[in-house]
Amino acid sequence: MGRIRTVKPELFRNEDLYDAYKETGLPVRTAFIALLTECDREGRFKWKPRSLKVACLPFDDIDMERVLHTLNTRGFIKKYSHQKDGRTEFFGYIPSFKKHQHINNKEKESFLPAPDAPDSAIIEPLTCRSHVDHATVTRSIGKGKEGKGKEQGKEQVLKDPCRVDTRPDEDEQTGEVILSGESLPEKTDPKARASSQQKQARAIDDIFQYWQTIMDHPNARLDEKRRKLIRNALKTGYAVNDLKTAILGCSYTPHNMGDNDRGQRYDGLHVIFKNADQIDRFIHNAMNQESMDANRENHQRGKNGLTFLDRDLTGTLDELWEKS
């Protein structure tokens, strides 16, 4: 049930929210404001994209899961899981909710579990399944069971070298945010130009190394052709993490991973970053990996069934038994 919430003027001047809109073309600003009305008094909501789509953006022809993913990766909302009676439920919350909202005392108490409850865990937007052994990428911020001593309430981050980071890309030394597709300054001092070039070069190296790991191409080289492909994708307006997500989505796509008539993999950067439609398709695949898994299983069942039908079924019952 929707609720009346306060929207401050500062929200419309939030540059990070505007950048998210410009980078994705999704109505993330409207969606974020609408999510405020779906939160309970603690800033929590049920993570049900289809229901939220109807409640927040009923007339927009968009993928609500992608809208939530965009807000999640940029820190405007957080997704978490909660274990109850052997079942896992998913929820979200707005970290800045209590800072900007004044709740009526008559509003009912929240009945949704807290993200820092013992059986709750923050979920990173995406994890990578793959060709190497990775740690589970889940940040457990629950207080845990009694008897943990100093470890109670301590945030734990299990790092995965192939995960799509939820934070903006930052300069490791200065902490300065590296903007996706950042254009080189044309009429500024040489130092600014050099700094921008260095940031873009680091972003390109980061994306290429991610592709190497996900696709298991350790001996591949970042030549000028591959560098140009990545650079053009960034200039189109995609964030570094968007392009990593597209790479991950390609790894989830059976046809591209060799499950085709030729038995050939189509996992090159020239395939993934061919155009915006291709990038969007692979991003969608990454964010709908459960559906991709189901499609892969159905495809495999179809192949197995075809193999059985192609068998030679001539002969007596005893002969057919021997062939089976």
Image: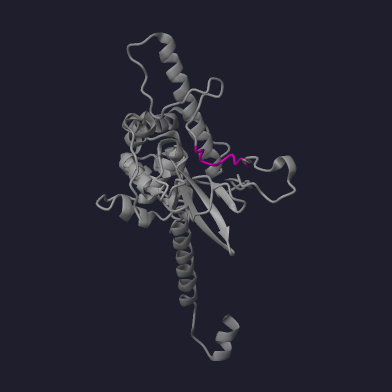
Identify the residue at image location x=53%, y=91%.
316
Relative vertical location of residue 204 with respect to residue 65 in this rendering, above or below: above
Q: Quadrant of the C terminus?
A: bottom right
Left/right of residue 68 with respect to residue 175 in the rendered view: left
Left/right of residue 291 with respect to residue 132 in the rendered view: left
Relative vertical location of residue 190 with respect to residue 34 in this rendering, above or below: above
Instruction: Report the span colored magenta.
Output: 158-166
Does the rendering let one see residue 117? yes
Residue 161 falls inside the magenta stretch: yes
Q: Quadrant of the N terminus?
A: bottom left
Identify the residue at image location x=57%, y=58%.
83
Pick whichever, 193 or 145, lies toward us: 145
Which residue is most to the left? 59
Does the rendering let one see residue 250? no
- Which picture quadrant has residue 318? bottom right
Relative vertical location of residue 132 with respect to residue 197 in this rendering, above or below: below
Q: Position of residue 274 (x, y in %)?
A: 36, 40
Relative vertical location of residue 286 with respect to residue 87 in this rendering, above or below: above
- Which picture quadrant has residue 70? top left
